[in-house]
Amino acid sequence: MVSREHKRAALHEKLQLLRSITNSHALNKTSIIVDASKYIEELKQKVERLNQDIEAAQTSNHQNPLPMQVTVETLEKRFLINVFSEKSCPGLLVSILEAFEQLGLNVLEARVSCTDSFRLQAVGGENEEQSETIDAQVVKQAVLQAIKNWSESTDQQEQN
C-alpha cells in the first residue's frame, strides 16, 4: 500500500511540473491550478486563432489559386503590362488577349514565356478610334478579371 507521504510527494512533484509547464510563479496548490487553467484557456484561444488563419488562407487560396503578379505602368499613351506566375498556365494568354481586345487595347509589342512558368510582358496602346481614354487601373482590373475567368474555367474543366 502506498503511504500518504509518498502520495503527497507525487502530488507535489506533479504540481511543480504543472507550475513549470505553465510558467506559473504561484506557490500554493490553488494558485498553480488557477494559473494552469488560465494557460489552458490561452492555448485554446491560440488554437482557435490558428484555425481561423488556416481557414482564411485556404479561402484566399481558393479565390486566387494561382499566385499571380500583375503590374500595369503608364508610358505616355501606352501601357507596360507584366503578368507572372510560377506555374505554367495553358490558355491564359488567350484570355488576357481577349481582355485587351474588349478594352480596345492594341498589343504593340509582347514577350511571352509559357514553359515552366507564365510570363507576359506587353506594351499596349489605345485604339486611335476609341473616344474614351483608358487608365492603368482599368487595364489591371481587366487583366485580373481575365485571370479569374480563366482560373474558373480551368477549375470547371478539371472537375468534368
Image (spheres, helix red, strand yellow):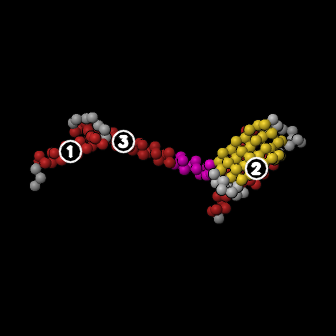
- Residue 122: x percent and y percent? 76, 46
Question: Does 23 lie within the magenta span?
Answer: no
Question: Does 66 lie within the magenta span?
Answer: yes
Badge 2 marks a residue whose secondary structure is strand
Badge 1 marks a residue whose secondary structure is helix
Residue 51 visible in the displayed image:
yes
Residue 145 visible in the displayed image:
no
Q: Tell me the crowding category of disc 3: few under 14, some 14 to 19, or many 20 or more residues within 10 angstroms, Cα based.
A: few
Query: In this rendering, which labeled residue sits more in front, label 3 or label 1?
Result: 1
Position of residue 144 in the picture relative to residue 17 (left or right): right
Badge 3 marks a residue whose secondary structure is helix
State how far apart marks 1 and 2 are (Cα). 71 Å
The dominant secondary structure in magenta is: helix
Position of residue 97 in the picture relative to residue 51 (left or right): right
**Which residue does the numbered mark 1 point to in the structure image?**
13
- Residue 82: x percent and y percent? 71, 45
Query: In this rendering, which labeled residue sits more in front, label 2 or label 3?
Result: 2
Does label 2 or label 3 sit earlier along the sequence?
A: 3
Determine whether 34 is above or below 160 in the image: above
Magenta extent: 55-67
Position of residue 51 in the picture relative to residue 131 (left or right): left
Amino acid at circle 3: Glu
- Residue 97: x percent and y percent? 77, 51
**Which residue does the numbered mark 3 point to in the structure image?**
41
Does label 1 or label 2 sit earlier along the sequence?
A: 1
